Amino acid sequence: MIKISRRTFLKASALAGLASSLPLMMNFGDYTKAAELAPVTRIPTMCNGCSSTCSKYVYVKNGRVWKVEGNPIDLKSSGRLCARGHGMAADVYGLGRVTQPMKRVDDNSFEPISWPQAFEEIGDKLYKIINESGGNSVMWLGHGGKEHYANTFLDEIGSSNYVTHYATCFSSKTNVWDRMVGTTLNSDFDNADYMLFVGRNFAGGIIPGAMNRITKAKERGAKIVVVDPRYCELAIIADEWVPIRPGTDLAFFLGIAHTLISEKLYVRSFIANYVYGFEEFWSANKDFTADKAAEITGIPADKIREIARDMALNAPKAFLDSGYHGLHAHYANSTQIAMMNVVVNALLGNMFKVGGLMPGASISLGHVETPARETPEKGPRADGAGVEEEYPTVEPSRGIPQIVPDLIKKGRVKALFIYHYNPLRTAPDPEYQKGLKDAELVVSIPVDWNETSLHTAHYILPESYYLERTEPPKVVSGFIAHDNPQIAVRRQAIKPVHNTLALLDMLKGITAAAGYYNLYPFTVEDEIKASVKPLGISPDILMETGCIEFPANVKPVFPTKDGKPALNTFTGKIEFSIGAFKLYGRPGVATWVPPLVMPQGEDEFRLIHGKQPWHSHNFTGNNPYLMAISDKYNGTWMWINKGRAEKLGIKNGDLVTISSEKAVKTVNVKVTELLHPDCVWIPSPYGGFSEKLKTAYQQGINYNDFIPARVEPLSGSVMGQEVVVKVSKGGIS
Amino acid sequence: MEASVMKRKEVVEEIFLILAEFYKYPTEDFYNNIISSDVDKQLAKLFKAVNYELDTPQFTFWVGDFKGLRAEYSRSFLGITAPFAVPVESVYKVWTNDTSFQIPIANSKGYVMGDSALHILHLFEHFQLQIPEEYAQMPDHLTILLELYAFMIKERSLEECKAFLKDHFDWLGDFEEALSKTNEVKFYLYVVDVLKKVIKEEEKYLEKQ
């Protein structure tokens, strides 16, 4: 008898003898009929189709997802989910997921390993790197979120290198608002009479709760004006779409401000009482008239004046929405754009006013008390964010993710943890980003086989899908003015489909294997309990409802203390002039800064990009249902202006070649009058190049292919729309 | 007679357990069994013992080196390149026949944890078996199905075995087709070819009972 080496997985159950809910049915058809009668259970949790993380209900039948719907209490969803909220729920059963820990065995191959093996090997390598190069050579590079887990680890080893994706998204906004206002304020859609959206598309980067409020405002007669190079989804419901030359939004804002000031339409009492640096601002910009703005933006001066006057007429129930991705990371003047957003709104006197900009209601959560640990002193940040000689005004809490390959090359980063982030597809220049693999240790923690994991990770540790894990509660906030604070919790709805873990459990395993014992002496249940303790509610109530709203705690009053303005700024006032910028030799106030590049030739265009309502950038591109929507609407096509296309002999649906110094690609085009002639527009979800993500693979192109990894010096952003591309008819020969 | 029936059950159990091993991540020991022709010889002997009308398998001919086998397994079944073919029954069948489901995949193919997986969990529960954690929510993985049949042929009635083969191995043609679209996967195509023939022989036997 030849002995064959084989493993037998099946074993007698330790739970033998338990009663089954159904009698034995050997026949598959009989079984499925009987299974249809099983009850449906509703489990509240939070979505992860995008970073809005709307509260939702997941209905489960026979342990599987049966239906999802929005939680009506939730500010972000208002009881309605977008296409991503529905589509991405099904991805839990999709084939793009990493099913167990993987170890790279050669350039393009992985072998499955067990969790203990993964922890042991990663822990050993980490131990050696920290011993040889110090804890500051370890970097945590993530989308952002669950900072407390990462920072506990980084504090323990003495690393200051927590880096988020925000420089590719909105870091100019947070950098500026924090310095000028000490907080961010949100649009009061419910009460505004005039809403100006510039480079902000709530119907594209969709938040259902926000769109619900905006459409209701429209129904009650509020005026909506959208300024955008593209007739975006929000423009469809606007009273007016004002196309603007891309890259010139700063000039538009300066023109608005000049009109408000020169025509004495601004709220002088508000400026006198609550603003520092007005004179300095006006002195630097008094020549920047609406006429000058018109020359730069292509928007007629009369239209600029009209918008300014209409806003003043409706103030304080008028606002310029504070914006997000489009203008706040993608231009050389994004920092000044953000500064001017503050200036325009302050001139309208709408801050802390009903119908203007209001703070989001918040509430303080508790946290688990853990024994104090002795931690080493941290070194300087590897990316130079907040470092005097490098990028002193860039927020260290956000960092500069796009230059990490250089930091590895310079020897500043030896071990890299990449969490829930895919820089090879969502940061500039994927070929350059592949340099991440050259760190001594690269651990990627995704849910799917994203490009970064596939091309750079030495180890891939799959996180459980959002429906498979429980996480500590969060305060619901952002973008929408609301008086009542809310908290929401992510609750596990189904058992993990694959051999995956929650992040906390991974970090427990890795840190223990690296010699940092008991660094996380708590469970997620302990965290939930501690979080709600100060709120006077039981964890059970939160777990049962998923989202809880508390009594209103926001008042339309400018914060004061002892009768003086008390914002979290140096003067307590809104600061039109930023001291830190002056300290490092830059103007303290916003002034005109031209874009880095301008298209000149007949075949040259500025490349801009944007979201689509059914995708979250590249994150959702592998979902067949969301991609079916893309197919239906030719969603992968690049937009080009009709007049410009005609001059190049390009017709709707043609294949064109688009090139920059970084890449040459081909794509089909949508020829339209609904785009400014100076630019071409690419939707952001596409250009997947992970073969493992079958649906996303090679669908469309991605704007990041065409741009180099650069750093805007004040806020650290990527300047992703500062690129000129050439477009020609026909594909690459 | 009783002894020969028992012997047959043990032989079939062994055949299915060996076949199940092919769908687990390859170990060096099993590879050595393949490359040394032990698997070919052993299966040929076992086939003969249960009167399967099958030639001696040629796994030795189709297998490359150990590293290549592991790479081929990863490429074929785990997939870091597309296309790939997951050896999981649910993926090749409509996800659920329960028309009350409202998630978009309900009526689609290509997803794990479909109705067939639920049925396997149901059988596990009744047979008082447990599966390893990594397959807990993917119980209709081919390696588990083959092990389950190995269990059933010893412990359950032939009628039940017949129903099981009919319901849970009817997707192998689709699997083979998917596998044929993957790159350089001759070895695993050959494995599924042998498996299909074995299933056919076993069904032939059960039909006669």
Image: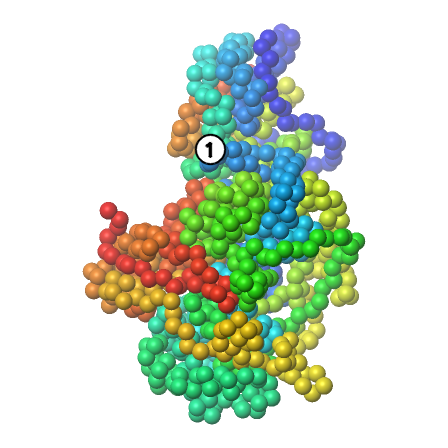
- Image coordinates of residue A541 in percent, x first then y, are 73, 60
Residue at screen point 72% across, 56% down: A528
Residue placed under numbered mark 1 in the picture: B75
Q: Nearer the viewer, residue A629 or A651?
A: A651
Q: Residue at x 57, y 31 (%)?
A: A27
**In the rendered image, is residue A154 in sight?**
yes
Task: Give neighbour class at mark 1: few <14, some 14-19, many 20+ (Cα, 10 Å).
Answer: many
- In the rendered image of this protein, does residue A306 appear above or below residue A538? below
Q: Name the residue rendered at 71%, 60% in the picture.
A: A542
Q: Nearer the viewer, residue A386 or A373?
A: A386
Counting from the top left corner in percent of width and height, residue B14 is at: 59, 16
Query: Residue A189 location in percent, x, y?
Result: 53, 76
Say which element carries label 1: helix
Residue at 49% in and 19% down:
B198
Q: In the image, A651: left or right of B12?
A: left
Examine the rendered structure and indicate whether residue B126 appears above or below residue A81.
above
Please state if A319 lies on the left or on the right of A550 as rendered: left
Q: Tell me if I can see residue A35 in this picture.
A: no
